Each structure stands twice: as structure tokens, then as C-alpha cells.
Amino acid sequence: MPDPDQGYLLNTIQNPRSLKPVYESVNRGNTTDDEIVDDTGLSVAAVDEGAKGLQRLGLLDSKDEEYTVHDYTWSTGDETLDFRLTSLEHLASSLTPPDWGKQAVFHLNYAYLIKEDYQRINDNDEAVRKQMDRWERDTLEYYPTYRGDRIDLNPNKMENWGRLATYLGLLHQYETHEFTVYPDPSLIYHSIKRAHDAAGRTVDGNPVIEVPTYLDWVSNNLLYLPDDTGGVPALLSRSLYQLMNEERIRLAEIGDQGAVAFDRMPTHDRREQSANSIVIMS
């Protein structure tokens, strides 16, 4: 969905707080920068950053100095969640190996944390940033360019990424540069429901989707998982565990597929020992 000829996401969005207010203002009928400034009370610079950032996210178009919005592709009853899910889905459209789109950096950075099993991260950690960029460059052959040169993941871009990933619900900030790493469980819950609508089934009156089918769907549509991911990575296991606590899902053994490994997940009374499927309970 994002235009590959547009600027680089992590240069454009330095502070994501203006994104949703600008989107909502345009959706209310304010189609020019001046109108959005008057409507929101944001500065001219914040409106400019928000509008350009929304274009990188595939949520806004600009023609003849007027803006139009793209509707959310999700309808959960929570507009913040719809914004996050739609943005993540649009960014996932850049995940086309080996011809990665320019904005694929957002999901690939997170995929590195999944791959290396980071539960916490400091966005000033030079070693992590360099290893992340090296993996994307040398293993994935991801080469976003500007004027013919590869765009490297420098410290400023890494901090910009951390702020955007927090805004979209993939990181959770607890100190200035310190974050816990796991997807907001509500993102995962609604992705399970969407994946079930595409490929699930009903067992004993309950919606069910097999875990491998869900992992394949989420990797292609919302949250990129590295190819060598075996079973459910720890970051997703954490979100699924929370959803079991909230009685929104249970993990069951259904059919004759083998058990799925849920990395680092503690035992739970809503998880069967040889679970291979997700049952949606609410």
C-alpha cells in the first residue's frame, strides 16, 4: 500500500503523536494544511510531519495540496486499534522478499527481535542496532536506497523506529530508552479473528484456527516472522498467554496434527498439553 517512491518512513516520522489527530482532522473534512492546523491546534511542522507520515503508512493521499484519507481496513470498535492494525497491515505490503519495499524496515526490525528472542530492548544499544542492520543487509539483502546509496539504520532512525513501534503497539516503553517487546494482546486477538475469517473452521460451535495456519497468515498480513521461526516465538506466546488469562482464547489439541511449541509459555489451564489450535472464546 505505501508508495515505494515515497520517502523513507524512519526519516519522515520522528514523533508519531500527530499521526492520528491529522488523520481524524482530514476525515472530518479539513483537507489543507491550514485547515488542519486551525482544527487541531497542532503546529505547522507537526501537521506536515503527520501528513507525510500518514502517506508513508498508506492512510493519506495528497493531490493539488489537498488531502484525502483511506478508510481503515479493520473495524474492531476501537478506533485506536483500527488505526494500529491498518497501519501494520499497510506496512506489511512492503514485505515481498527478495524485492523488499522501502518501508519494510519497520517489520524487519521487529522480526530481528523475534528471531533473537529479545524480551527487552534499549533503542540506544549500538550493538543491537548494528546487528539488526547487518542481518537485514547481509542475510535478507534489504537495500533501501536514497540517491543511489543504501539507507543504514543509524541511531536517529533507530530511535524513530522505537517511537513508532510503541505508537503502533509492538513495544511498551517503561524508561526513556527502555522498552519491553511484545505485541499488544488486542492486536493479536483481532488478527486471530481475521485469520479465522479467512481460513478457520468451527468445532463444537466455537471458531477454531490451527496454529500453523494462523502463523502463516499473520506473517503475510500483519507481523513478519523470520523464515526459521519454529513454533510460536516467545513474543507471540506472551500475548497469547495474556489472551488466555482474559478468557478470550484457549489453546486446544484438535485433529491429528502434532503439538505446537509455544516458546517460554508457562502452563495454563486453558492450554492443553498437545495444543495445536486456537479456539476463540469471545
Image (spheres, helix red, strand yellow):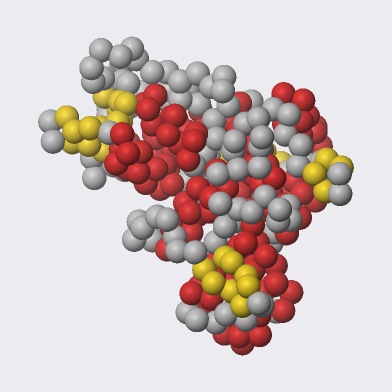
Which quadrant would residue 153 be assigned to in this image? Answer: top right
- Does residue 124 show up? no
- Does residue 97 show up? yes
Residue 64 is situated, as x and y percent measured from the top left of the image, at 66, 77
- Quarter of the picture containing the C terminus is top left
Which quadrant would residue 270 be assigned to in this image? Answer: top left
Q: State the residue at coordinates (50%, 48%).
A: 89
Q: State the residue at coordinates (71%, 53%).
A: 5
Asked if 8 appears above or below 52 in the picture, the reply is above
Residue 20 is situated, as x and y percent measured from the top left of the image, at 55, 67
Q: Nearer the viewer, residue 144 or 166?
A: 144
Residue 148 is situated, as x and y percent measured from the top left of the image, at 86, 44
Q: State the residue at coordinates (87%, 42%).
A: 149
Residue 230 is situated, as x and y percent measured from the top left of the image, at 50, 18
Q: Nearer the viewer, residue 181 or 64?
A: 64
Asked if 261 appears above or below 270 in the picture, the reply is above
Seen in the image, is 46 located left or right of residue 241? right
- For this orientation, the residue located farthest to the front is 64
Seen in the image, is 187 located left or right of residue 102? left
